[in-house]
Amino acid sequence: MTILITLMDPSFEHFDHTADMGLRIRAATLPALIEPAGRALYAAIGELVPGEPADPATFNLTGTDAAGILREFLAELLHLVESEGRIATAIDVTQFDEHALIASAQTANLNPDKTDFRREVKAITYHELNIRPIPGGVEATVIVDI
């Protein structure tokens, strides 16, 4: 008997959540969640267009569960946008599990002429934060305060 397992392509979707916005992110593995999670956050903010390359960023986060670490990662990406006008353009994940996220990213300054900020994301919340297994991979739910 042969069992065929199909791995899920990384994806995300937004959903309404009271005065907030929900992000539902799916991927085949925990490390594969990182890239679409970043894209989901950026898409919640608007159309963030990269401009000139900037300094690379490193992420060395620890915690007691993967969902909390994912939240911290998204909070750091939000800080890069708000404080430095930069976005991660390519992320290389070395480790992501319930204990740590170790990753590096190429970054770029936002192109001010082409970037379209559609809404302010104030914070990444803990409300309904979770990562759960689904057929073919994992799914994360994150609520952002807008």
Image (cartoon, grey):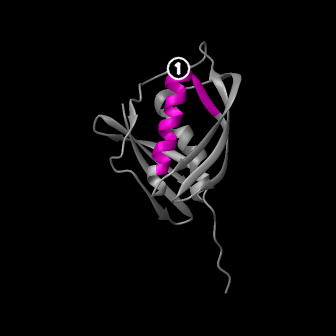
Give coordinates of residue 98: x percent, y percent: 51, 60
Image quarter hosting the N terminus: bottom right
Q: Quadrant of residue 3?
A: bottom right
Residue extending furthest right? 53
Q: Quadrant of residue 137?
A: bottom right
**Residue behind mark 1:** 116
Predominant SS along the magenta part: helix
Residue extending furthest top? 113
* Picture residue at 33% right of the left edge, 36% below the top: 20
Q: Secondary structure at mark 1?
A: strand
Give coordinates of residue 58: x percent, y percent: 64, 39
* Picture residue at 67% right of the left edge, 42% below the top: 104
* Picture residue at 50% right of the left edge, 40% below the top: 74
Residue 13 sits above or below residue 95 on the image: above
Give coordinates of residue 117: x percent, y percent: 49, 21
Q: Nearer the viewer, residue 138 or 73?
A: 73
Residue 46 sits above or below residue 30 on the image: above
Q: Quadrant of residue 119?
A: top left
Residue 65 sits above or below residue 93 on the image: below
**Relative side of 31 to 69, left or right:** right
At label 1, the amino acid type is Asp
Q: Nearer the viewer, residue 102 or 51?
A: 102
Tell me which segment is drawn in magenta. Answer: 69-88
* Picture residue at 34% right of the left edge, 50% below the top: 128
Image quarter hosting the C terminus: top left
Residue 21 sits above or below residue 30 on the image: above
Give coordinates of residue 50: x percent, y percent: 65, 24
Q: Is residue 86 magenta?
A: yes
Q: Is residue 84 magenta?
A: yes
Mark 1: give few (<14), some (14-19) or many (20+) Cα within 10 Å. Answer: few
